[in-house]
Amino acid sequence: MKRDALSPANWTPRTWAMAVGLAILALLPGYVELTGATFYLDLASRLMILGIAAVSLNLILGHGGMISFGHAAYLGIGAYSVGIPAYYEIHNGFIQIPIAVACSALFALITGAICLRTKGVYFIMITMAFTQMVFFAFVSIEEYGGDDGLVIEMRSEFAGLFDIEDATRLYYFIFASLLATLYLVHRITRSRFGMVIEGARGNERRMHAIGYDTYRYRLVCYVIAGAICGFAGALLGNFTNFISPEMMDWTASGELIFMVVLGGTGTLFGPILGAAAFVLLEEWLSAITIYWHFLFGALLILVVLFWRGGLYGLVDWIGRAAWRKRS
Amino acid sequence: MAQALLTVEDLYKSFGGVTATDHVDLQVIPGEIHAVIGPNGAGKTTLVAQLSGELRPEAGRVTFDGRVITNLPAHARARLGIARSFQITSLMLDMTARDNVALAVQAHAGHSFRFWADARRDRDLADTALVGLEEVGLADRADQTARIMSHGEHRLLEIAMALATKPRLLLLDEPMAGMGVEEAQRMIGFLAGLKGDKSMLLVEHDMDAVFALADRITVLVNGQVIASGAPDDIRRDEAVRRAYLGDEMVDASGSAD
């Protein structure tokens, strides 16, 4: 039996969900062009940036079982890596983005080396504590606006080759980044390295017994996730043209966890669905009531109680139900 | 006596006021099956944990193949060639049987900082894993998630994973625990087949198994070695009979469990 997994005839409901989702994102600027509803472009840009952040969190949380409650630190570090150089009139993205990725990786390496020596609720608390440290550090730096934040006058430009000043161009830059992130994470999770990460989540004791120093693998995974999220932070700074410590508030870290859990932990595209649900619900519910966080919480409880697989799991279920009906 | 593969000297470990390992001396000769028996609470599992590196002894020395490993962590010992099975099944339950064994193969195929190629399409890993599953008779279960497999299959999978690391010493902590008679017989047969090929330290309650398999037996009571020797000597040993085996062991066929 030879099945071509790439042929649409053999796609699973999940693959379809991902293909449709990405197709909508790819075609959205065209729709916006026709209707002039630029608002959707903004919404989808934010969705994709948070999606990249959620995908990176999912790498450690879903695949690695490391429940970090401080992942928003990297959004902040990435955004300030654009904002601070811009403050000194350095707008070159080829400088800003490597700074964002390198600083995030370094922060992940240093804090991860400590955090990963703890387990369970201690890990959750210590990751949060480190992020709070960064948060208060930026609050206290008056030069960069303190808690008022900093306006980024000009978006990254790439050594005169191209810039992302135009909203549609920024959109496609973010979209391409999203695709690259998904592919990267897809490869990592299926690699030998990914198997070790998965195994360490399942049974660390057994992994030690067969010869893995799981600490080292987890630390590298933690650094990769931090670096990707730092990149998302650089996009976020460019997108909002404004940065403030609020980006790395502990609630922002909570929201990233929310997206991962709502979308489906340990799945490739789930966090994107989670980010989409988050951004869209936030938009719609906040128009209805100022107590929208309450409805949000209720939704999360329902998902955790009754739908462990998250939205991505729901896609599977609907897909199978539809298949049964057809045959 | 041949050069010992594993030498334990004067090992000591206590928990609070309770002495779990009380100055234990022990040797495993290459190719032999060395059984450790003793009543519940004698400190057998604690001993295995100190040999595998999960627990650090407070005093004493463990030497493996001429190298002092007393302070090496579990993963480093595994890389030197010490594999273990757990008394309570310890697997990656959300993974398939094949992935469980493949991970064990991968652990001894260089480092795993390889981020790009699909591990499941790696023929070296997959084929070796399948051979390992065949050896314990689980080949037809390769693609089952470990969680849904039976207890007996879990025990076999434990052994397959341990063997997949190509160990020189197997630490087997009650491999027959919780098995039915038939399954236990199958396991005994399998371990007997490995005899001479692999050195083993076998902790077991099942006396039939111990006397069927062991070349030498060490008896542990309250963390102390009260006797050590060939099965026939152990069976005749007065102190052992009093402390552990009971009168039923007077005839060779008896089982204490």
Image: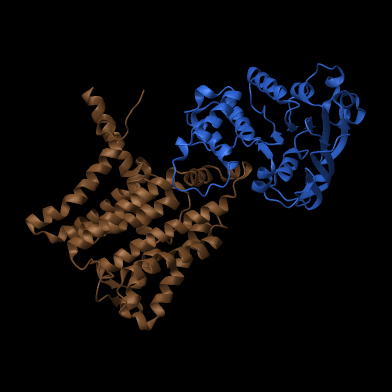
Chain colours: A brown, B blue
- Assign the N terminus of chain B to one quadrant of the image: top right
Q: Is residue A160 left or right of residue B88?
A: left
In the image, farthest residue toward the right = B238
At 45% from the left and 35% from the top, the residue drawn is B121
Asked if residue A7 is positioned above or below residue A100 in the image, the reply reads: above
Percent coordinates x, y for residue A188 in the rendering: 43, 48
- Residue A268 visible to the viewer: yes
In the image, farthest residue toward the bottom = A143
Total labels drawn: 0
Q: Is residue A255 left or right of residue A16?
A: right
Asked if residue B131 is positioned above or below residue A65 in the image, the reply reads: above
Percent coordinates x, y for residue A307 in the rendering: 35, 41
At 64% from the left and 27% from the top, the residue drawn is B178
Asked if residue A141 is positioned above or below residue A21 in the image, the reply reads: below
Percent coordinates x, y for residue A320 in the rendering: 28, 30
- Image-quadrant location for residue A140: bottom left
At 11% from the left and 53% from the top, the residue drawn is A31
At 61% from the left and 29% from the top, the residue drawn is B155
Q: Is residue B106 left or right of residue A91?
A: right
- Image-quadrant location for residue B28: top right
Q: Nearer the viewer, residue A247 or B198?
A: B198
- Assign the C terminus of chain B to one quadrant of the image: top right
Percent coordinates x, y for residue B251 in the rendering: 86, 16
- Residue B136 visible to the viewer: no
Q: Nearer the viewer, residue B231 or B197?
A: B197
